[in-house]
Amino acid sequence: MNYLVAPATMKHYIKLLRPKHWAKNLFLFVPLFFAGKFFELDKIALLIGGFFAFSFLASSIYIINDYRDIEDDKKHPEKRNRPLAAGLVNKTTSLIISVVLTLTGLALAFLVDTSGKFLFITGIYYVLNMLYSFGLKNISIIDILILASGFVLRVKGGAELAGVNTTEWFIIMTFLLALFMALAKRRDDVMLKLSTGNEMRKSMKGYSLEFLNTLIALFSAILIVSYINFTVTPAAHQKYGFRLFYTALFVIAALMRYLQITFIHNKAGSPTDVLYRDRFIQVTLVLWAASFFVILYLRDLTFFEK
């Protein structure tokens, strides 16, 4: 289907990159924070470079994904406003930008870690998401597993650059949280399908409202239990020297709010938008992070010493 290409502006090309979604790449900084070494500036500098490497690669993938989904996005009440679907940017120019971002991202990944380990992780992320864009996103369950794996790769990449270890608990909870959010996003797609009658993506044939509701409830429960189990392990108590299970309050509150957004308001389509807009979740995340900051960096000043 042909359509006229409207005069493009810098604003439209910036929107094409989806820079607000770069917030996902802040997961690279998480391992360093929990290792208690967040103020080591040399490692922060490496992580900033890694952040932009991941961001450039993510934007290049977004462009390819949007290019392949032009016709499907036109059926979506929100995605139809994306620059390519709306005809606001030139297709060829967009693909050239994608190639440049890919090369720049991979080059930067090598520069921040010449051993090639971080480049290997970003390479896996890129290949996996390109496979997603070129077909795997049409296979139900596989699509959300790939989305969740991207967060695990960010955490592993951040740990590699920072030179710190990630525990099995940390990887498990990262994966579970990402799965939970991906399932909520798919539920939003099902709700749109039911209200508009349009099938937004082929993978939706493998999802139903009842199926997703069950999985969301299941994984939210598993996530809470996993987090509480982690906080009471001897290793966690020895490392943090604190009754860590108190922090579960913030995790439970944030998940309850996300479930409310998902089931009551039906607005869990974009986890990034939820993070940017919802004050309740923002406050709980800040309080959760602040509690760990006190535990890790101000332990000597707190009465919660062991």
Image: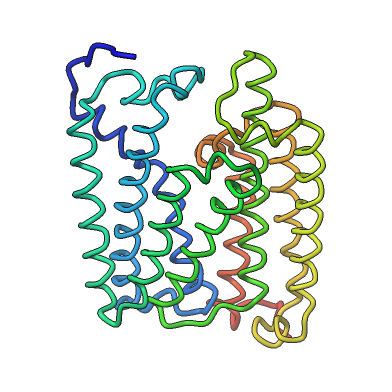
264 displayed left or right of 147? right
Number of labelled discs?
0
Q: Nearer the viewer, residue 165 or 72?
A: 72
Q: Nearer the viewer, residue 81 or 243?
A: 81
Which residue is painted at 45% across and 56% down in the image? 128
Residue 298: x and y, percent? Answer: 55, 76
Residue 97: x and y, percent? Answer: 20, 42
Quadrant placement of the N terminus: top left
Residue 267: x and y, percent? Answer: 63, 29
Which residue is painted at 77% across and 69% down in the image? 245
Quadrant placement of the C terminus: bottom right
Q: Nearer the viewer, residue 91 or 161?
A: 91
Answer above or below: position of 147 versus 28: above
97 displayed left or right of 239? left
Residue 158: x and y, percent? Answer: 43, 70
Which residue is painted at 43% across and 74% down in the image? 38
Q: Quadrant of residue 185?
A: top right
Which residue is painted at 71% across and 86% down in the image? 235
Q: Quadrant of residue 21?
A: top left
